[in-house]
Image (cartoon, coloured by chain):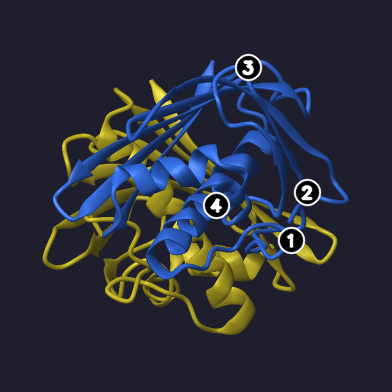
Chain colours: A blue, B yellow
Amino acid sequence: MVDILHRVGVQTPTPERVYEALTTVDGLAGWWTGDARGSGEPGGVLEFRFPPVGGFDMEVLETVPGERVTWRVVEGPAEWVGTTVEWRLRQDGDWTIVLFTHAGWREPVEFMHHCSTKWASFLLSLKSLLETGSGAPAPRDVPISDWH
Amino acid sequence: MVDILHRVGVQTPTPERVYEALTTVDGLAGWWTGDARGSGEPGGVLEFRFPPVGGFDMEVLETVPGERVTWRVVEGPAEWVGTTVEWRLRQDGDWTIVLFTHAGWREPVEFMHHCSTKWASFLLSLKSLLETGSGAPAPRDVPISDWH
């Protein structure tokens, strides 16, 4: 089992504002994909689509306001189903530190390499959304390769 | 042991041009840090500095033109020393695919999360250098957090 790990710091906002961007459809649509719907509350399912290539359904496992959000992938590419995505938040002075883990990959396949880089790019989109009011969600996301 | 994995695609250039950006001081200074020196040939040592915070010395273990470059970290932060950085290149149509592995981390510490995101950002700098002629090496690198 291998994990994707990332860390970004968001300047100025509180963990509560980052938490909102991870648990509301409006927030998620501002940095990950404009085609987001569903419920970010525990037990809810969030549906993220990236036309025309598909997407992911995430069951919300846990939310602790300002501290933690955990999802489990219930629909999507075979490599993703059953993996978990965890967000940990904390305040460090003027910064909100975001620790990200996408855990439970069965093999370090080439698609995992791609997803790791793409997650980094979306975390910087989240940072930008909160710092400037403007993120780069799909379909306006930063292209990183032939796989978009 | 846990690894950092990434994948980017560089449009237009050949694997030979990407290889050059990984094995020459001029190439490396164009996307990673302007303060790069040493030799990118097997047995050589490359020194990368990021004033004022330090840097890394990499022993070049293997170079296969247009295909592969491997470094071992011989000086730098304790978490890095002894780890290996591997670049694998291949041509896919108009694209050069770059598969990156920073292997041998002993623990998934918070610094590893940071380095994972930062590597992604530098891989996009490498892509930009080769596609547009302009990368974002330190000290002009993209800030991702309070740790820069």
Identify which residue, B5 or A91, lies in the foreground. Answer: A91
| Rendering coords of residue A15 (x, y %) | 31, 43
The CA distance from mark 4 to mark 1 is 12 Å
Mark 3 neighbour density, 10 Å: few (under 14) some (14–19) many (20 or more): some
**N-term-proximal mark, 4 vs 1:** 4
Label 4, secondary structure: give it: helix
- Quickly name the residue at label 4: A122
Asked if A80 appears above or below A26 in the picture, the reply is above
In the image, farthest residue toward the right? A52
**N-term-proximal mark, 2 vs 1:** 2
**N-term-proximal mark, 4 vs 2:** 2
**N-term-proximal mark, 4 vs 3:** 3
- Quickly name the residue at label 1: A139
- Residue at image position (57%, 55%) is A31
The CA distance from mark 2 to mark 3 is 23 Å
Chain containing mark 2: A
Mark 2 neighbour density, 10 Å: few (under 14) some (14–19) many (20 or more): some
Identify which residue, A83 or A23, lies in the foreground. Answer: A23
Q: Badges 2 and 1: C-beta atoms under 8 Å apart? A: yes
Quadrant showing the N terminus of chain B: top left
**N-term-proximal mark, 2 vs 3:** 2
* Drawn side of residue A138 relative to residue B78, left or right: right
| Rendering coords of residue B13 (x, y %) | 70, 72
- Quickly name the residue at label 3: A106
Q: Amino acid at mark 1?
A: Pro
The CA distance from mark 4 to mark 3 is 23 Å
The CA distance from mark 2 to mark 1 is 7 Å
Q: Where is residue A13, by image quadrant? A: bottom left
